[in-house]
Image: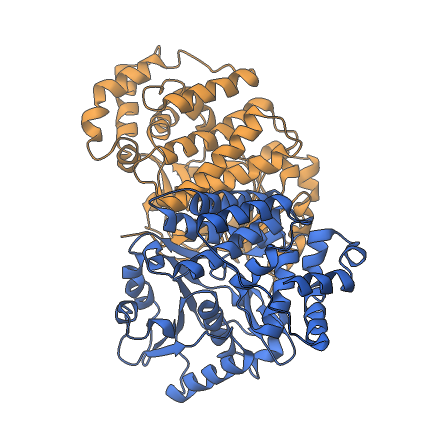
Chain colours: A blue, B orange
Amino acid sequence: MYRNFSIVPKIMFGRGAFNQIADILNERRIGEGAYMVFVIDDVFTDAPLEARLPLENGDMLLRVNVEDEPKTKYIDELVEKIRAFNPKKPVGVIGIGGGSAMDIAKAVSLMLNNPGSSADYQGWDLIKNPAVYHMAIPTLAGTGAEISRTAILTGPEKKLGINSDYTLFDQIVLDPELLVGVPKDQWFYTGMDCYIHDVESLQGTFINEFSRAYGEKSLELCREVFLGEHEDKDDKLMMASYFGGMSIAYSQVGACHALSYGLSYVLGIHHGIGCCITFDYLEDIYPEGVAEFRRMMEKHDITLPRNLTKNMSEGDLEKMVTTALGLVPLWENCLGPDWRNIMTRERTLELYKRM
Amino acid sequence: MYRNFSIVPKIMFGRGAFNQIADILNERRIGEGAYMVFVIDDVFTDAPLEARLPLENGDMLLRVNVEDEPKTKYIDELVEKIRAFNPKKPVGVIGIGGGSAMDIAKAVSLMLNNPGSSADYQGWDLIKNPAVYHMAIPTLAGTGAEISRTAILTGPEKKLGINSDYTLFDQIVLDPELLVGVPKDQWFYTGMDCYIHDVESLQGTFINEFSRAYGEKSLELCREVFLGEHEDKDDKLMMASYFGGMSIAYSQVGACHALSYGLSYVLGIHHGIGCCITFDYLEDIYPEGVAEFRRMMEKHDITLPRNLTKNMSEGDLEKMVTTALGLVPLWENCLGPDWRNIMTRERTLELYKRM
C-alpha cells in the first residue's frame, strides 16, 4: 500500500517574495471582521522584519518564544490568547520564523478548529477538523517544517508531532533574502538537520525513486552550500530544505533523528544542534555521511558541545533510551525489520553515555 | 512580481499504485447517482489495462482517439457525449494515457463546469469556474502533462492551451509499471519532450533556483534513462517527467518548443516527435544539449523523419513561422528581450525549410 502524499498546494519562491504577502492574504480577507494572526518568533521583536508585516486593522501580532521547543501547554495558551483577542476565528494564521515558529503556527491553526488540548492530538491522523488557513514564511532553512505534515510538540508524556494532512500549510512563501543575518551556528545546525535527514532517507530501507530524486538533489544542494562557495547559497539552502522535506514522502529519517529526540525530550536540547551532536557518534551506521559532515564542521569552524550526559542519573538516561527506541518507523527505515537485535537498549545507552 | 505557483496537491507514486485507484475514488463517490468518467486512450481498447479500471455501476468509459492531437471541437463533442450519457455531472474525471489523453481529461473536466466552447478558453486564466475533480494516470512519461496547468488544444485559430490553476489535476497516480510495453519510438520521443524542455528551461533567461533544482535533477534522470542502464529506468523517467514539469514553475520552454508548435499546427505532427525533429536543427542555440541528444538517438537507434517541409507552399511555411514567433514568452526566455532581432522571420523560415 502506497501513501497518497499531500503537498503544500501553493508556493511562491524568490528574493523579495515577502513583499507580495499582502496580495496573497488580501484574497483571504473576506467577510466582515476578517482578521489574520501573525505568529512570529520574538527574536524579531521591533526588528525591521516585524515592521514589514502587512498588518491591517484588527489583525493580531502574536510574538512567540522558542527558547524551549514548542510544548503542548504553550500551544493551548496561545489558542486561548487568540480567543481572548477576538472571539471570532481568524481567517488566517501566518507563521514567520524557523521550525519551531512554523510548527506553532501549524498547531495553533489546527487547535482553533479542534476541541480539547493539543496534547490529545499528538500522533498520527487524530485531528478531526481541517485547520484555519495557514501560511509559512521561513526565516531559517533546513528543518523542512515548511513542507511537512507534522507539528512537533513536547507534551506531558512525549515529544511527538501532530501528524495529519490538515497540518500541512496551505501556502508557503520562500524568500531567500530572509536568511540574511542568521547567526552562523544556528544557520549551520539548521542546515545540518536537512543534510542529516537526506543521508538518513537515502540510506534507509524505505526509499523509492520519488524520495530518492528529492533526497539526492537536496544532498547535492547542501554540499554546494556547506562545502562550496556560491553567491546564491541562501536560495540553494531554501531549496535543499524544501526538497529534503519532500524526500520524506516515501521514506523516513533514521537513527540520528531518533536519538536526538531523546536528547530533546530529556535535556531540552534543540533539534538542529541535537542532530549534530548525535550524528557525530554514528559513523558505524553512516560512515560517509559522518565523514562529510565533519568536513562541513571544519570548514565553518563549528565546535559541538560535549559531555552532555556526564552527570545524568541512570533514570534520565533510561528515559532517553526509551524515547529514542519508541520511534519504531525510524529504526525500521534505518536498520530493517530486525532492528531490535541491532540497536539494543545497551547499545543505545552506550551511545548516549558517550555524548 | 513572482508567480504564486499551484501544485497538484495529491500524489501517489509506486509500482502497482494503479491497484489503489479504487480506494482513492471511493472517497469521492458521495451522494446518490455519483459516477465517474474514465477518459482512456483508445489504444487500450480491450487491453488488460482497460479491464483493470475500477468501473462501478453507472460509471462511463470514454475511449478517446489521439491520432490527432486534441482539438477544441473534439473536446466539445466529448462533453456533449458525457451530458447525453447522464444529465447529472460526474463527480470525477480520470485521464489514463499520455499527454493528449491527460489534456483531454483536463479540458473535459473544465468544460463540464464552464459554458460555451473550449475554444473560448484558449489562453491564460480565462476559465471562470473550477473543474470537476480530475485525476491523471499517465501511461507515458515525459510530457509533464500530469503536473502542468495547461491543456493544450488545437482550435480553429491556434494551437494554444487552456492555462489556469483550475486546469491542474487534483490527484496524480504515478505507477512506473504502466510504462511497460510502450513502443520504443514513442517512449523515446516522449522522453525527449522532457529532456528538451529541461535544456530549454536551464539555459533560459527566466531561470531561478527553484526551477534550476527541478530542471537539473530531471536532466540527470533523463541521462540515466537514455544513456545508462538501470533496472528502475521507468521509475526514473516518471520522476524526470514530474520534475521537468515542476521546473517550468519559474521558467519557460524555448526555441524548440516554439518551432515544434508550428510543425504541429500546420502539419499535425505530434508534439514529442516534433520537438525531436526541431531540436536536431538547433545546435547554434543549444550546442551541448543537441550533441547529447544525438548520442541518445544513436544509442537507441532512432531515425528522425526528414524533408517534411519540402513540398509545402510558401503560405503554409509563413503560417508556421507566424505560429512559432507568436509564442513570445518562449522566445524571451530563450534569447532575452532582444529576441526579435535575433530570431527574425527569415531565420525562422530558413530553419523550417531545412526540416
Using the image as rendered, state which of residue A314 and residue A166 is in the foreground: A314
Using the image as rendered, state which of residue B185 and residue B96 is in the foreground: B185
Q: Quadrant of residue B352?
A: top left
> How many discs appear?
0
Q: Residue at x 41, y 77 (%)?
A: A64
Q: Quadrant of the C terminus of chain A?
A: bottom right
Using the image as rendered, state which of residue A26 and residue B260 is in the foreground: A26
Q: Is residue B16 visible?
A: yes
Q: Quadrant of residue A175?
A: bottom left
Q: Position of residue A311 (x, y in %)?
A: 64, 74
Q: Position of residue B273 (x, y in %)?
A: 46, 24
Q: Position of residue A120 (x, y in %)?
A: 62, 79
Q: Quadrant of residue A86?
A: bottom left
In the image: residue B317, left or right of residue A322: left
In the image: residue A320, left or right of residue B296: right
Q: Is residue A39 visible?
A: no
Q: Position of residue B295 (x, y in %)?
A: 50, 18
Q: Residue at x 29, y 29 (%)?
A: B323
With respect to residue A159, does A12 lie above or below? above
With respect to residue B115, does B123 lie above or below? above
Q: Residue at x 65, y 29 (%)?
A: B181
